[in-house]
Image (cartoon, helix red, strand yellow):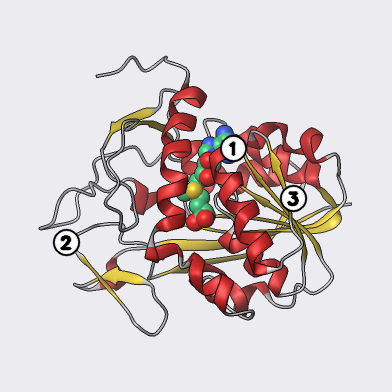
């Protein structure tokens, strides 16, 4: 096992830099559809729309934007978007996507915690993030302050994220749901060493270690409240946009979401949290 105190940023960055081009080439991210269809939106943003509402004219920042598919989707809905990610390889793909899709999106290379300084703004109307973002962050209190620092008073956080109960499950068990990993935040990371990724690809990866943290729902809400955010919505969903527990989930053609095949009502798969920065 790797030492738990190795540089988590360097380890995770190597993992993401290697995966970004494979993700952009994978049919799961549907980059070619963005290029071919001017109105195409990612399934993630399409799912968000009923809760997200009209974003036309909003100045938005997408934290941990990865290869930019959701960022470009929000731009296509009329938001003026900035994407932030610490992976230069992911941003190369994101910039290529935005250029090919004709979307005017700025992408900034930065660690989440340095985002306010890196983008040079504190007046965003919208911070958008999630779908595999918080698990890479060791400090949820610092994240909540980062979100608040990016928003103008009255500006909104929109996050749809894997539910901390989902992250705590053993995703190698195909027979039953087993809580294997921490639900509550731990100072020391859970270190994984796994060869694959969450999309369909033939690429063999060299950098397979990752350092991850779970954050309980109460810890996330409390961090946001303490950072001066007011909670305006919290919805738990019975679906998730990736195959999070392989062997136990089925996809639905209607919304491209995955659910437990057996009694999905047992598990909060994901949640959407919204909060507004108080004045
Ligand atoms: C699972 S991806 C996010 C997925 C995204 N919602 C999507 O599907 O396109 C996680 C992203 O977080 C980024 N990331 C991880 N740790 C980070 C950090 N400390 N600061 C900035 N970005 C980080 C990675 O580079 C990666 O692009």
Question: Residue 137's x, y, as percent?
Answer: 53, 35
Q: CA distance from mark 2 to mark 1?
A: 33 Å
Q: Which residue occupies the extreme bottom position in the image?
A: 254
The crowding category of the residue bearing disc 2, from other C-alpha atoms within 10 Å (few below 14, some 14 to 19, many at least 20), is some
Query: Does the CB distance between marks 2 and 1 fall below 8 Å?
Result: no
Circle 3 or circle 2, nearest the eye: 2
Vertical relation: 38 (above or below) 275: below
Q: Which residue occupies the extreme left position in the image?
A: 175
Vertical relation: 206 (above or below) 263: above
21 relative to 76 in the view: left or right: left
Which residue is at 30% across, 58% downward? Answer: 200
Under tag 2, what secondary structure?
loop
Circle 1 or circle 3, nearest the eye: 1
Q: What residue is disc 3 on? A: 229
**Which sits earlier in the primary sequence, circle 1 or circle 3?**
1
Q: CA distance from mark 1 to mark 3?
A: 31 Å
Residue 45 can be seen, yes or no: yes
Vertical relation: 196 (above or below) 278: above
Residue 274 can be seen, yes or no: no
Q: What residue is disc 2 on? A: 247
Which residue is at 64% across, 33% downward? Answer: 111
Which residue is at 74% across, 58% downward? Answer: 105
Which residue is at 61% across, 45% downward? Answer: 91
Under tag 3, what secondary structure?
strand
27 relative to 156 in the view: left or right: left
Q: What residue is disc 1 on? A: 88
Under tag 1, what secondary structure?
helix
**Which of the 4 image quadrants contains residue 196?**
top left
């Amino acid at each position: 096992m790797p030492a738990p105190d190795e540089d988590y940023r360097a380890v995770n960055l190597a993992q993401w830099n290697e995966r970004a081009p494979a993700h952009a080439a994978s049919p799961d991210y549907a980059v070619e559809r963005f290029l071919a269809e001017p109105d195409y939106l990612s399934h993630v943003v399409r799912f968000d729309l009923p809760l997200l509402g009209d974003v036309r004219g909003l100045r938005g920042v997408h934290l941990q934007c990865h290869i930019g598919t959701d960022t470009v989707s929000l731009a296509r809905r009329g938001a003026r978007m900035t994407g932030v990610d610490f992976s230069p390889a992911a941003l190369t793909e994101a910039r290529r996507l935005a250029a090919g899709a004709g979307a005017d999106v700025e992408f900034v290379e930065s660690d989440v915690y340095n985002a306010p300084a890196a983008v040079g703004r504190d007046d965003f109307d919208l911070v958008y993030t999630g779908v595999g973002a918080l698990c890479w962050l060791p400090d949820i209190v610092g994240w909540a302050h980062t979100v608040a620092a990016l928003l103008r008073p009255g500006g909104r956080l929109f996050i749809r994220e894997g539910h901390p109960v989902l992250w705590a499950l053993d995703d190698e068990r195909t027979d039953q749901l087993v809580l294997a990993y921490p639900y509550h935040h731990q100072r020391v990371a859970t270190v994984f060493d796994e060869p694959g990724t969450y999309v369909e690809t033939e690429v063999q990866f060299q950098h397979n270690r990752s350092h991850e943290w779970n954050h309980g729902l109460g810890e996330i809400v409390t961090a946001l409240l303490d950072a001066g955010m007011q909670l305006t919505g919290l919805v738990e969903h019975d679906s998730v946009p990736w195959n999070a527990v392989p062997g136990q989930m089925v996809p639905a053609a209607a919304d491209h979401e995955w659910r437990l095949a057996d009694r999905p009502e047992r598990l909060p798969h994901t949640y959407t949290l919204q909060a507004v920065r108080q004045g």
